[in-house]
Amino acid sequence: MVVASLGAVYVVATHLLVTDAKEFIASEHAAQAVGIKAQLVSYYSENMTWDGVEKLFSEHGRYRGEEHGQGGQFLLTDPEGRIVYAGSHKLREVNLSPRLLAEGIPITVEGKKVGILFTGPLLGQFTEIEERLLSSVRRTVAYAAVISLGIALGIGLTLLRLITAPFERLTAATRAISSGDLTHPVPVPGDDEIGRLGRVLEELRVGLSRSEAARRRMLADIAHELRNPLAIIRAKVEAMLDGIQPANEENLMTVNERLLHLSGLVDELQDIALAEAHELPLDRAPIDLVEFLRGVAADARTLLAGADKKFNLEIPAKLPRVSADRRRLHQIVWNLLSNALRHTHPGDEITLHAEPRGREVLIQVSDTGEGMPAETVSHVFDRFYKGKGSKGLGLGLAITKALVESHGGRIWVESAPGEGTRFSFTIPISRT
């Protein structure tokens, strides 16, 4: 264990110091590159070719003292990476990958890239003197590693404790969440990475807590929705069994209506579950929206004939075909029309509107009815939502949202008390 720790300290320290030494050497070469880059720009501007550029590098090497390892370690290529000049045989053998070409120093003349300059360190090549310097650094680190091992171990153990303690608390909080205990807040130790992790876990806990509360409310609402028709069915059947009421067609029809209501509720819950799990089967086919919406409008006018409400159909002569399940699309539009019918009064208007929007078709159902407060608007697609003074929204709009999203569309609502309501949704245009 001690030998392994010593080896780790040596490797890390060597890497750091050698890296620093290489960076220092690279900075020296970079300083040289600044000067020679200006000379190269001037050379190419005068000659419009790199022919004979070797003389420029030779003069630069003599001036900088190449024999001492302080000059000449340059590689020049054309913009495509073909070597024009190499300061050594090793540099000529370097494989110039696209990444290396991107890291080189561009030589630009009149806004045009005419070459790429590389220093030796940029390509991992060093002179003999520089290699000896790097070897000296490695030996020094090896001596220092043994001395620093004890200090490093002490500091390491202390830091280990400081680091692991917050993680232990977060681990305990995570186990509590996974076991279903959402009552205890997750500790947030600070503003560092561990603190951010703690805040994420706390947000997760709060979100799960809200989801659990919503699930419980939904179960209570479902139980409430089932309780009333079941109670009526039970009372009717018991009354008929006890002879209090006759088992005639009228009473049996009442029982049948309640059974149909229960069956519809179960079907709606199944549709929502399948849609949210992206498993709702859709019989997609190209649909002529003009013909489809005119058919819906005819049914709506028939329904509104005796309600003293005006129905408007606003569609262009032609609309793109959409890719949708015809039965489900009819369910979407009719759910929105039924909702408008329930929340309008005699004299109000209901409008069905459609228009193309890019790769989608926008369909809107608007009315001039009672409208909704902002609180209800924000929950209008929630299952069984009941606002203050409201009888509840049931499952219709929740199903509508799930069906629209199953088709790859979006749905939203705009409303204000006394100003009416407008539901809008999109359906993708058919590609066939």
Image (cartoon, helix red, strand yellow):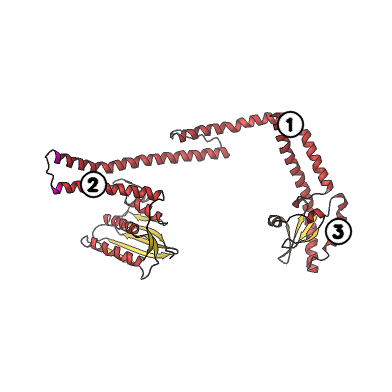
The stretch in magenta equals 240-250
* Mark 1 residue type: Ser
> Does the magenta-highlighted stretch encompass residue 245?
yes
Q: Is residue 318 left or right of residue 87?
A: left
**Nearer to the camera, 93 or 20:** 93
The residue carrying mark 3 is: 58
Q: What type of secondary structure mainly makes up the magenta span? A: loop
Crowd class of label 1 (few under 14; some 14 to 19; many from 20; radius 10 Å): some
Vertical position of residue 209 compared to residue 63: above or below = above
The residue carrying mark 2 is: 259
The residue carrying mark 1 is: 148
Q: Position of residue 299 (x, y in %)?
A: 26, 62
Quarter that holds the N terminus: top right
N-term mark: 2 or 3: 3
Residue plotted at (29% across, 57% down):
340
N-term mark: 3 or 1: 3
